[in-house]
Image (spheres, rainbow, N blue to C red):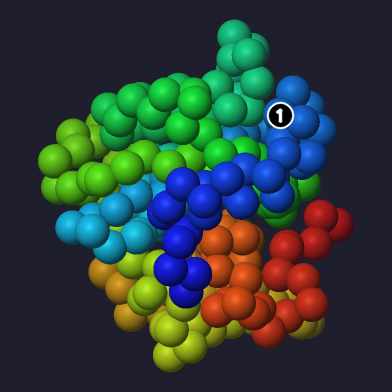
Amino acid sequence: MQPDCLSAEGERRCRRLLAGATARLRARPAAAAVLVPLCSVRGVPALLYTLRSSRLAGSHKGDVSFPGGKCDPTDQDVVHTALRETHEELGLTVPEEHVWGVLRPVHDRQKASVVPVLAGVGPLDPQSLRPNPEEVDEVFALPLSHLLQAQNQGYTHFCLHGHFSYTLPVFLHGPHRVWGLTAVITEFTLQLLAPGAYQPRLASSERPTG
């Protein structure tokens, strides 16, 4: 892991690397946006995740996710969508100046574009948050050191109509399994934060859009 990923220099490096994509993608229409909260838990760099409520409709209830949701017509751009949804789900207010930039969009099975927004939220105790019980069952953090350990990394092979279709990363041995698009976004984040320590074993982990 890059030791300076939470330092001012680490933040400047990430902002610089994300500047082009942020300028290009921030105002582009998208179906949804999520916030990737980079935090410090008891001094340890970590990513903050949610466990979606089991009471939600749809196939993703009970899944691990980053806070976020559908873009609203009143949102100025995808950054505002991610910040608004994070406040609604977790009661966590993240100032816009804490946003480092926009990561590469991913697509779900319906070809809907989901834009990840990386932000530094500082020291945080996940247990101090008061998530909306209608949307979130649990909030937890996974240290970057845990995510970067090879024994906690794997891949899931997906089939479509009985035939192999695509492979996505999965992160194991935490409170809950991180898989699907959330794992893909996690992989993008690790590649940015710790390029010397994390090397994906796939040429591309993004779910095909077809």
Residue 29, image x and y in percent? 76, 26
Mark 1 neighbour class, 10 Å CA radius: few under 14, some 14 to 19, many 20 or more: some
The C terminus, quarter of image: bottom right
Residue 51, image x and y in percent? 33, 52
| Front one among 9 and 70 | 9
Q: Which residue: 59% across, 9% down?
A: 74
Q: How many marks?
A: 1
| Front one among 8 and 207 | 8
The amino acid type, in three-letter code, at marker 1 is Arg
Q: Which residue: 68% across, 45% down?
A: 16
Return the residue found at the far bottom.
Answer: 151
Return the residue found at the far top.
Answer: 74
Is 70 positioned to the left or the right of 135 in the image?
right
Return the residue found at the far left.
Answer: 128
Is 134 positioned to the left or the right of 209 in the image?
left
Is 29 positioned to the left or the right of 96 in the image?
right
| Front one among 191 and 205 | 191
Residue 152, image x and y in percent? 42, 83
Q: Is residue 192 above or below residue 156?
A: above
Is 43 positioned to the left or the right of 34 in the image?
left
Q: Is residue 136 above or below residue 162?
A: above
Per the image, the residue denoted by label 1 is 26
- The answer to which quarter of the image holds residue 191 is bottom right
Q: Secondary structure at mark 1?
A: loop
Q: Is residue 96 above or below residue 43?
A: above
Q: Which residue: 48% across, 40% down?
A: 119
Q: Which residue: 73% across, 63% down?
A: 206
- The answer to which quarter of the image holds residue 205 is bottom right
| Front one among 192 and 170 | 192
Asked whether residue 138 appears in the rendered view, the answer is no
Asked whether residue 6 appears in the rendered view, the answer is yes
